[in-house]
Image (cartoon, rainbow, N blue to C red):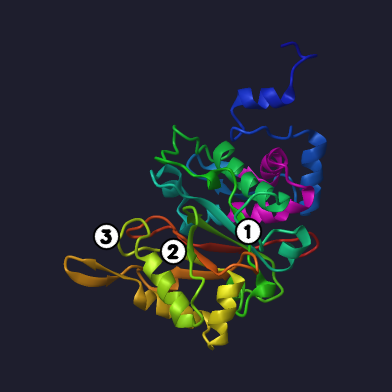
Amino acid sequence: MSAETSDPIEELFARGVTDGLPVVPPTAERVQAAVAASGRRGDELIGLVAPANGRATVERVAINAVMAGCRPEYLPVVLAAVEAICDPDFALVGVSGTTDAVAPLVIVNGPVRRALEVNCAASVFGAGFRANATIGRALRLVWVNVGGARPGVISMSTFGQPGRYSYCIGEHEDASPWEPLSVEHGFAAGESTVAVMAAEPPQVVVNATGRTAREILSTVARAGTVIASPDVAPLGDTLLVIAPEHAATIAADGWSKADVRRFVWDECRIVIDGAGAPKFSEPERLHIVVAGGTAGRFSAWVPGWPFRGAPSRLVLKRVRLPGRV
């Protein structure tokens, strides 16, 4: 094609910087608008993105956020998520090369979730919500385009998963009877945060008849024994997503998040070499959020990575908003 008739979207496909779907051309104006909305310098370094240790500057992250379809005001959340995957505790080198089907799951807490309308309710893991779709997609594009984790080259996931397009949810704090994930990890109730976990797809657990905490959580624990395999333990960081109806029933019996965590850890056991063993390495590796629609008696397991040893941890970062230190 000549310069006059070239298609910028097709050019980006040809350059190999998409995720297989069309991306928004990152014009100078669009990128500058995103950088300005972050309140940070374009050349500020956020982190080195494995496995290539590419330099994720604010501008480079903004370019990928624009391509993902983010509005400029989403960039502070994307920057916090990039900071999280660059944290050594996330172990991005291993996550990048594993044959497992994990992707960075972003969980948004605090006022920024409401301000950006990050979906936390019905269809929380589904499509149709721009903030969720584009924030998660921007993080994935940074991982590939800056970090070099190209599928079939470095990223050797046997199956992959839809979350490798985008994987981002909010916690439904208004429908939760408990403190949010961010507060559990030491942040103030009014702070905006992102948590990122290397995560497999959600595995839905239904209990439509249980009317006590013990009945519901016994079902949840039995479902948890088959994560990865009924013969594999102990697992590391794993997310338990409890929908509001289940959460309300559990809390009505006076159970706290700590009670839920301990009960599930105690009950979720498997048999190895003829002896009982806990499915998870320690109760603290079970992370609990309330999310999803207010109709439906469901919970969901979101398995983490890897299953043995578990060097990849859930990482939380504060969202740095313009005008704040």
Q: Earlier in the sequence, mark 3 or mark 1?
A: 1
User: Can residue 184 be seen from the camera position used here?
Assistant: no
Distance CA(mark 2)–CA(mark 3): 18 Å
From what the image shows, is residue 166 above or below residue 247? above
Q: Residue 237 got which mark?
A: 2
Q: Earlier in the sequence, mark 2 or mark 3?
A: 3
Three-letter code for the amino acid on which mark 3 is drawn: Asp
Residue 313 counted in the magenta span: no
Tell me which residue sits at (65%, 69%) in the image. Answer: 294
- Mark 3 highlights which residue? 231
Decide if residue 110 is on the left or right side of residue 55.
Answer: right
Question: Which residues are the magenta region?
Answer: 56-83
Pick the quarter of the image with the C terminus: bottom right
Q: Are marks 2 and 3 in contact (CB under 8 Å)?
A: no
Q: What is the secondary structure assignment of the residue under circle 1?
A: loop
Q: Position of residue 89 (x, y in %)?
A: 47, 59
Pick the quarter of the image with the N terminus: top right
Q: Residue 124 got which mark?
A: 1
Decide if residue 235 is on the left or right side of residue 238.
Answer: left
